[in-house]
Amino acid sequence: MGSKAVKAATPAVAALIAGGAEYELLPYEHRAGEHAFGDEAVRALAGSGLAPEQIFKTLLISLDRGSDLAVAVIPVPATLSLKAAAAALGRAKATMADPAAAERSSGYVVGGISPLGQRKQLPTVIDASALTWERILCSAGKRGLQMALARTIWSGSPAR
């Protein structure tokens, strides 16, 4: 009897499966018209015993006013310091990426951009607080779907 291949829900989940990483998917109802995607995830998962600071958002930034993009992963309640992110990446300046450019580069829609399984591999900085939690949540690659990951999955330059 052959084994049945499991179809991954998103490229992020496929990357976790390919890497043998443990994860848990946490779906929630995404409301049409909602644009504060991280806050929506925090509200939806409020009853799960997670602190808002355990839920992370994925932001794409443009470096040195050019077309080079990078990824910043920070807690939902936090505000990204573009200066600190640029410095962590060895660059002089960073701005928020154009949403259309972020979607083209990542392969995900805004509000569902995961730090994993992106179309293009980009330099990534992760807030140092990710290492203080046993597990954190981030987008699994679509609106209304978070994934819980062990802190051991994260590596890279911490920045806030």
Image (spheres, helix red, strand yellow):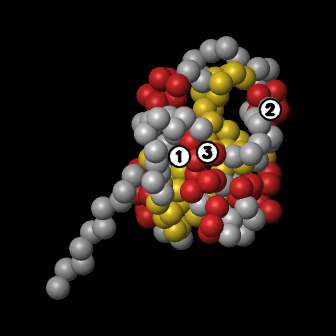
| The C terminus, quarter of image | top right
Tag 3 secondary structure:
helix
Which residue was labeled with disc 2?
Answer: 81
Q: Tell me which numbered mark, 2 or 3, is placed earlier along the sequence.
A: 3
Q: Tell me which numbered mark, 1 or 2, is placed earlier along the sequence.
A: 2
| The N terminus, quarter of image | bottom left
Give the foreground label among 3 and 1: 3
Picture quadrant of residue 72: top right
Q: Is residue 56 visible?
A: yes
- 153 vs 84: above or below: below
Residue placed most toward the observer, 142 or 119: 142
Q: Which mark is residue 38?
A: 3
Distance between the Cα atoms at labels 1 and 2?
20 Å
Q: Amino acid at mark 3?
A: Gly
Label 3 Cα neighbours within 10 Å, binned few <14 / some 14-19 / many ≥20: many
Residue placed most toward the observer, 24 or 17: 24
Number of dots carrying numbers: 3
Tag 1 secondary structure:
loop
The residue furthest top is 65
Label 2 Cα neighbours within 10 Å, binned few <14 / some 14-19 / many ≥20: some
Q: Residue at x 79, y 54 (%)?
A: 129
Picture quadrant of residue 67: top right
Which residue was labeled with disc 1?
Answer: 114
Q: Amino acid at mark 1?
A: Ser
